Amino acid sequence: MGTPDLPPESRPEQELDEFLSGTFEEGPEHAAPQPGPAGAEVPMIAFSHVSISFNERKVLDNVSFTVKRGQTLCILGRSGVGKSVALRILMGFLKPQIGSIRVEGEEINGLDEEGMNAIRKRVTMVFQNGALFDSLTVRENIAFPLRERGGMAEDQIQQVVDRLTGLVGAEDVADDLPGSLSTGRKRAVAMARALAAQPEVVLYDEPTTMVDPIIAKRLGSLIQRLKRQLGFTSIVVTHDMRFAERLADQVLFLHQGRGTFFGPLGGFLASRDENIRMFLDLDAYRIPAV
């Protein structure tokens, strides 16, 4: 599915290719997508009344949200409320019992594996554990989607790999195996590999969990840069409010499987909902000095 509202020279795929090859010239920030002639912009991602249960326990209960092209949505909530499940549904790893999931207007709920593989070329995910190939070096992991796609000479692949390892601060471990890396380094490498696939949407599952502050800041800055310069669309599942405050255009707050808030970050921070206030207060809590 194309993006008819963007001229060929400004399509995200081409800009990302230039960005990764080092030929991208930084210009003004991407403007927010404008409505079409009918006044209704088709969301990049749309969940509508999605429900899923495991062993008769509802994990997501009638959850709806949309993400416009170029926006960053942060999904917040306590552990076990279904935040990561929403990402796995979008990737087609789980199937909801009820609801509609659309990628730029295309219904994906019910697609066969071939259809989902086409969606996964547009939407990719950075998992908590990195999900790297243990037998491949960092360099080979990042090069894998480039070789799968084809059409690039080996020296071009290595140039892109070098660019990506530099972006995520993994130059010094490029020839190491994933087993020797810390959790934070694995996640940074997984992010580099996701970008090598040249997606339109990136899903991040708890990118700062068990990550040191330096790596967390680097990952957050890169997500911001991809959005600002290339108009990337992102969905970030996180417990980290400071991270969310840096990134979020929109917030979805899940409580007991239900979306009790969906809207701009400012509205979330100002909400008087008792569950949201408790979440924010706990996040801000500091152990008092003895």
Image (tube, rainbow, N blue to C red):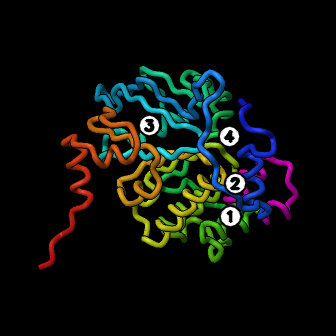
Instruction: State the CA–CA distance, disc 1 to disc 4.
Output: 18 Å
Disc count in the image? 4
- Compared to residue 198, the image places residue 101 above or below, namely above
- Residue at the spot 59% in from the left edge and 62% down from the top edge: 189
Q: Name the residue under label 4.
A: 121
Q: Position of residue 163 (x, y in %)?
A: 72, 66
Q: Name the residue under label 2.
A: 196
Q: What residue type is labelled 1?
A: Leu
Instruction: State the CA–CA distance, disc 4 to disc 3.
Output: 18 Å
Instruction: State the CA–CA distance, disc 1 to disc 2.
Output: 8 Å
- Compared to residue 5, the image places residue 237 above or below, namely below
Quick one: label 4 or label 2, which is nearer the N terminus? 4
Q: What stretch is highlighted in magenta?
A: 141-159
Mark yes or no: residue 124 visible: no
What numbered label is drawn on residue 86? 3
As for residue 279 lying within the magenta part, the answer is no
Answer few, some or many: residues within 10 Å of disc 4's Cα (few below 14, many 20 plus, some between 14 and 19): some
Dominant SS of magenta comes to: helix
| Quarter of the figure with the N terminus | top right
Q: What element carries label 1?
A: helix
Q: What element carries label 3?
A: helix
